[in-house]
Amino acid sequence: MKKFNLHNLVRPNIRNLQPYRCARDDFDSGILLDANENSFGSLIASDLDLNRYPDPYQNKLRDGVAAFRGLQQQQVFLGSGSDEAIDLIIRVFCEPGKDAVLITPPTYGMYKVSASINDNPVIQVPLSPQFQLRTRDILQKVTPSTKVIFLCSPNNPTANLLDREDMKEILANFGGIVVIDEAYIDFSGKDTMVSDLNAYPNLIVLQTFSKAFGMAGTRLGIALASPEIIRVLFKIKAPYNVNKLTARAGLQALDRLGEMRRTVAEILAERTRLAERLETLAGIKKIFPTDANFILIRVDHALDTYTQLAGRGVIVRYRGDQVHCEETLRITVGTPEENDALIRNLKEILS
Ligand code: PMP
């Protein structure tokens, strides 16, 4: 097992940072004349007291997420989507203009975008043609300045889970941070990697309320890691990064896990039906296996098909410009009616 030293891995300026102290760090009740809020109230009447800043620590919601995943509150970071966590992780560990992140294309686009915004070089080690990790290549490509590896399982846009043993091999043999993005894990029927958090101090698991919970509009993302890593993320986050409306929605969602699981089951049933219907269409060369709420297909003239579908008001994602994804479209599983409309239009376009 490669040595992991969190202290040395954190950028020195972050290590030495004196974080912003919120007014509410010292007192949170009484006659609150400490935060320049509007004491006369909010324009919108609400029992949430929207004139007051939210809890910077989101303790209640973090308790809820921790209970849901069988963890402790101190292992939970919440942000404005997992996109915020991606950005913060890069900024904690990667010196701009110097340190590198490693990604495994084809994969989610924000890892590269966030790294580029922070001026961090991006090392790319493509997945195999079967969309699995090439672990030996990854570990060979790592340099002393490679600080973060992003893995995505189930992977976007290919929809498949990465092999768990491969991910563990990277966790064990890389001395930096390994982020495993599990945005789609609840569609996979497989266990999350959070049970490995104790074994691997360099692991950060990303999850989100945007997919299985159906709450993309609230912007609520999750990073799960050791209490030490979570503490560093807290150090640099904007003080009030999860607002009160979002926090309430998150708590309500966690109270409806049964409903979430029923919806996931419906989406999976609909995914099977969609895949079966796609199979019958001429012009579709391949339907890739999926562990997520979307399907990657290979189709004749993918870009043209995409454009024609859009012209008919059915919007899918063209992914043919990504490695190993020539002539592909990524299709989110819709409602039965939406999927019927997709099939009807695809059939006409491809015939
Ligand atoms: N990770 C992956 C793999 C995604 O596909 C997405 C969204 N498409 C995200 C993270 C971002 O999700 P969020 O809404 O939590 O920012």
Image: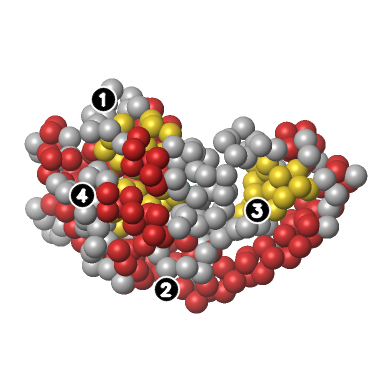
**CA distance separating discs 4 and 3:** 35 Å
Q: Secondary structure at mark 4?
A: loop
How far across and how far down the image is residue 4, in percent? 17, 48
Comparing labels 2 and 3, the label whose residue is closer to the camera: 3
**CA distance separating discs 2 and 3:** 34 Å
Location of mark 2 (residue): 255
How far across and how far down the image is residue 58, in percent? 27, 58
Location of mark 1 (residue): 98
As rendered, which of 37 and 297 lies closer to the eye? 297
Comparing labels 4 and 2, the label whose residue is closer to the camera: 4
As displayed, is residue 125 above or below residue 54? above
Q: Which mark is residue 2?
A: 4
Which comes sooner in the sequence, label 1 or label 4?
Answer: 4
* Label 3 Cα neighbours within 10 Å, binned few <14 / some 14-19 / many ≥20: some
Q: Secondary structure at mark 2?
A: loop
Comparing labels 3 and 1, the label whose residue is closer to the camera: 3
Q: Are marks 2 and 3 in contact (CB under 8 Å)?
A: no
Number of numbered callouts drawn: 4
Which comes sooner in the sequence, label 4 or label 2?
Answer: 4
Which comes sooner in the sequence, label 3 or label 1?
Answer: 1
Question: What kind of residue is marked 4?
Answer: Lys
Residue beneath the point at 39% across and 32% down? 123
Question: What kind of residue is marked 3?
Answer: Phe
**CA distance separating discs 3 and 1:** 37 Å
As rendered, which of 218 and 226 lies closer to the eye? 226
Question: What kind of residue is marked 2?
Answer: Asp
Q: Secondary structure at mark 3?
A: loop
* Label 2 Cα neighbours within 10 Å, binned few <14 / some 14-19 / many ≥20: few
Quadrant in which residue 112 is drawn: top left
